[in-house]
């Protein structure tokens, strides 16, 4: 696979970042991805402070390669997480779902690399201005929370590439070597993938969730929460109930009553394995997931697919 400005910036072999993922990207997944030559990341979104510290200590034992810490800025304590990350020795950070002007000054030091996740050209320019070293440009094909503008990856990436000078990783809808090559053809310096990494041996997600990804087809995901907190996840009884209520114009209060007392539907689905009533965050690329390999096997496959796709273009 091609070496790019991103591989150089991060000191990694393949231009592949494993996206930080709430509930399902702990130190084990991060270390496996980094050991395989990508950038593994701890997703701090669902972790208590002591869990973040523990995960950082363990990832440092688990790999000598570069790894990152993802900080979703919807966490009201994101400044504390940044401080903990720096104290524990994290040196590569991705921040998401928030204002890069607030995150940049917290994390930028001479020994850190900071990357911001954006869903638009405007967000990309702001991140560059805030001093970020690179951008993850995410289309709304992606699993998890999406940008409200619903830009798709194939048209957003070249627009962002044209708008900034720093390296760009494309995210959303990429799950095989063909997708990685396509992202580079659009001018990106690499990719960030989430959904594909959930269905790996090392991912701590519940086996029921992984199995649902393997079974998913092209129409397997949907977006809910356009009035609240837009999210792409697998279709199931709960998300279809939400989508139907939204179609009928349900108010935020009505939607909250459908969510009910359960305080975290994502944990219920992704960790506890309730695949009908929990939320299973996943992107449209779920339809490209057909097996649950180890991370090392996945990297071998991605590399072979990439080279085959490239040869097919010659
Ligand atoms: C289960 C899951 C949880 C996610 N949680 C987060 C998160 O906590 N922080 C974040 O920045 N992105 C999160 N994302 C987005 C990923 O980091 C990544 O950008 C996205 O999955 C890429 O698109 P793809 O799913 O098509 O590969 C999540 C994605 C998934 C599938």
Image: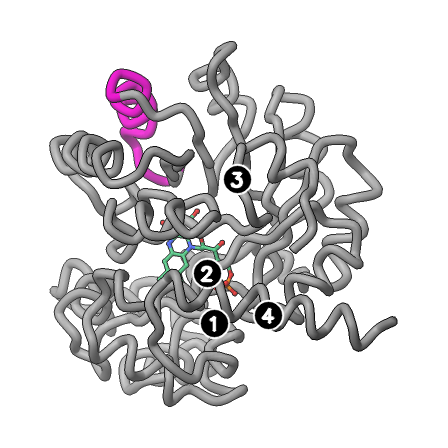
Per the picture, the main secondary structure of the magenta-coloured stretch is helix
Which quarter shows the N terminus? bottom right
Magenta stretch, residue numbers:
73-88
Residue located 23% across and 81% down the image: 275
Tags 1 and 2 touching, CB below 8 Å: yes
Between 62 and 77, the residue placed more toward the observer is 62
Ranked by sequence position, the earlier of labels 3 and 4 is 3
Residue 266 % position (x, y): 25, 63
Residue located 38% across and 78% down the image: 234
The answer to whether residue 305 is above or below residue 132 is: below
Ranked by sequence position, the earlier of labels 2 and 3 is 3
Look at the numbered disc 2 and give the secondary structure of its residue.
loop
Q: Residue 223: which disc?
A: 1
Q: How far apart are marks 1 and 2 (CA)?
A: 7 Å
Look at the numbered disc 4 and give the secondary structure of its residue.
helix
Ranked by sequence position, the earlier of labels 1 and 2 is 1
- Asked if the beta carbon under badge 3 is closer than 8 A to the nearest atom of ligand 1, the reply is no
Asked if residue 125 lies left or right of residue 296, the reply is right
The answer to whether residue 2 is above or below residue 291 is: above
Ranked by sequence position, the earlier of labels 2 and 4 is 2
The residue singled out by tag 2 in the image is 230
């Amino acid at each position: 696979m091609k070496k790019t400005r991103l591989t150089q910036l991060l000191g990694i072999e393949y231009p592949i970042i494993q996206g930080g993922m709430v509930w399902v990207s702990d130190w084990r997944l991060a270390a496996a991805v980094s050991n395989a030559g990508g950038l593994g990341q701890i997703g701090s979104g669902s972790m208590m402070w002591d869990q973040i510290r523990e995960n950082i200590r363990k990832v440092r034992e688990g790999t000598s390669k570069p790894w990152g810490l993802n900080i979703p800025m919807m966490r009201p304590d994101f400044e504390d997480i940044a401080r903990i990350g720096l104290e524990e020795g994290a040196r590569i950070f991705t921040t998401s779902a928030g204002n890069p002007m607030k995150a940049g000054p917290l994390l930028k030091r001479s020994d850190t690399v900071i990357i911001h996740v954006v869903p638009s050209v405007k967000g990309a320019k702001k991140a560059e201005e805030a001093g970020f070293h690179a951008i993850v440009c995410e289309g709304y094909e992606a699993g998890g929370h999406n940008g409200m503008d619903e830009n798709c990856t194939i048209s957003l990436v070249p627009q962002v590439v044209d708008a900034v000078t720093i390296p760009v990783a494309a995210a959303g809808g990429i799950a095989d070597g063909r997708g990685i090559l396509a992202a580079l053809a659009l001018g990106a310096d690499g990719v960030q993938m989430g959904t594909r990494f959930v269905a790996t041996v090392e991912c701590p997600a519940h086996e029921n969730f992984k199995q649902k990804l393997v079974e998913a087809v092209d129409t397997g995901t949907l977006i809910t929460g356009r009035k609240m907190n837009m999210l792409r996840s697998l279709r199931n009884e709960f998300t279809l109930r939400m989508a139907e209520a939204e179609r009928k114009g349900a108010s935020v209060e009505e939607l909250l009553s459908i969510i009910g007392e359960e305080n975290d539907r994502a944990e219920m689905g992704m960790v506890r394995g309730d695949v009908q009533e929990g939320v299973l965050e996943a992107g449209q690329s779920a339809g490209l997931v057909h097996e649950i390999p180890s991370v090392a096997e996945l990297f071998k496959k991605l590399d072979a697919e990439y080279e085959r796709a490239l040869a097919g273009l010659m």
